[in-house]
Image (cartoon, coloured by chain):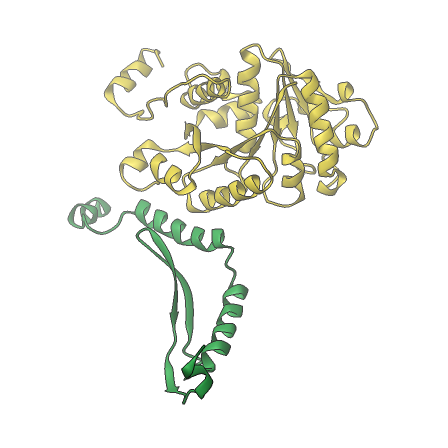
Chain colours: A green, B yellow
Amino acid sequence: MLEFLTRLFSRESSTSKDIAKERLRLVLVHDRAGVSPQLLQALKSELIKVISNYMEIDEQGLEVNLDSSENQVALIANIPIKQMKRLPENIVSGP
Amino acid sequence: MGEVIVVTSGKGGVGKTTTTANLGVGLAALGHKVALIDADIGLRNLDVLLGLENRIVYDLTDVTGGRCRLKQALIKDKHCEGLHLLPASQTKDKTAVNPEEMKKLCQDIAQEFEYVIVDCPAGIEQGFRNAIAGADKAIVVTTPEVAAVRDADRIIGLLEAAELRNPKLIINRFRYKMVQQKDMMSIEDIIDILAVDLLGVVPEDEQVVVSTNKGESVIQDERSRSGQAFRNIVRRIKGEAIPLMNLNQNGMLNKLRRIIGLK
């Protein structure tokens, strides 16, 4: 009865089927991409290596995750920058 | 040359063996020569579902190991003319057979039978690779749960990697009422996520337990709803275009029909 009432008054809140579908969709993004925690860790350390050539970043605060919204999946990287490096001449001038 | 169909799911307990038994009985009831292969080496179950557990002399590994001829190991079903079972070994493990041997075995059996249905073990390891080795087509069984659909997705990927393209999906243990209440994923939800063709939807049915207890198949029960769903699936396997049955069992009209024994 209580369940019925809560459902009646909270039309907008998602039903357990919607929760199931959303959880499934997220888990399948990882499954299908073959993304393992190890792979994300490797990606993370390579990102740190490359970005460190240009700026000083907070390695502890670095977050890399696969995220899926509406119809797409994105690789979301949150990289806190501590300080910019003074770039060497050859990189600035480029080819 | 007959058609070899593997019934698989990834997750255990979703109804692979029940599906295999019912499709076998259903196809044989329509006059086809059918052989069922229990590929779950070490954990045989299909014999019990068919009520043939007391008639096993030789098993699958005896055939692949050359200890008996294929004809000696195939058990004739007692109720159903044209249905045969090749039981799994209960004492050996999955490594007792390899995919090449299974492929040869399926080819040999398909010489004699119109339909060969392989009951695949749960999991994605050697037992799975053995079971799909000789298959021409695949049926994936799932239930409307997150874990089962996830495993089905993994299995579909592995089947396609093994060149078994376009597997067909059976959604088992479907509860119309819960879907109406939005507490269970719908057929559309599951098809949308897995992106495969639907072969059929089997409603949750207590009658399956009753039939299994007796070593019979629910497909032979004219009044059972899951039996009707399996009969429809059998006809779809034969290539007929059969629409999905009405899954709403709580409508007044359906209740009335059941009371007077029409359904």
If the image is split into quadrants, where does the C terminus of chain B sit?
top left
Task: Decide: is B140 above or below B72.
Answer: below
Question: Residue at horizontal 56%, vertical 39%?
Answer: B159
Residue A57 seen in the figure: no
In-image side of B98 versus A10 (left or right): right
If the image is split into quadrants, where does the N terminus of chain B sit?
top right
In percent of width and height, residue A79 lies at: 39, 76
In-image side of B5 versus A75 (left or right): right
In-image side of A89 versus B78 (left or right): left
Nearer to the camera, B214 or B247:
B247
Residue situated furthest front in the rendering: A95
Residue B252 seen in the figure: yes
Q: Would you identify the image quadrant in which residue B129 lies? A: top right
Nearer to the camera, B250 or A21:
A21
Residue situated furthest left in the rendering: A9
Q: Would you identify the image quadrant in which residue B222 lies? A: top left
Task: Decide: is B217 above or below A92.
Answer: above
In percent of width and height, residue B126 lies at: 67, 43
In percent of width and height, residue B226 lies at: 43, 24
Mark count: 0
Question: Residue at horizontal 66%, vertical 35%?
Answer: B133
Question: Residue at horizontal 50%, vertical 33%?
Answer: B166
Question: Residue at horizontal 50%, vertical 78%?
Answer: A49
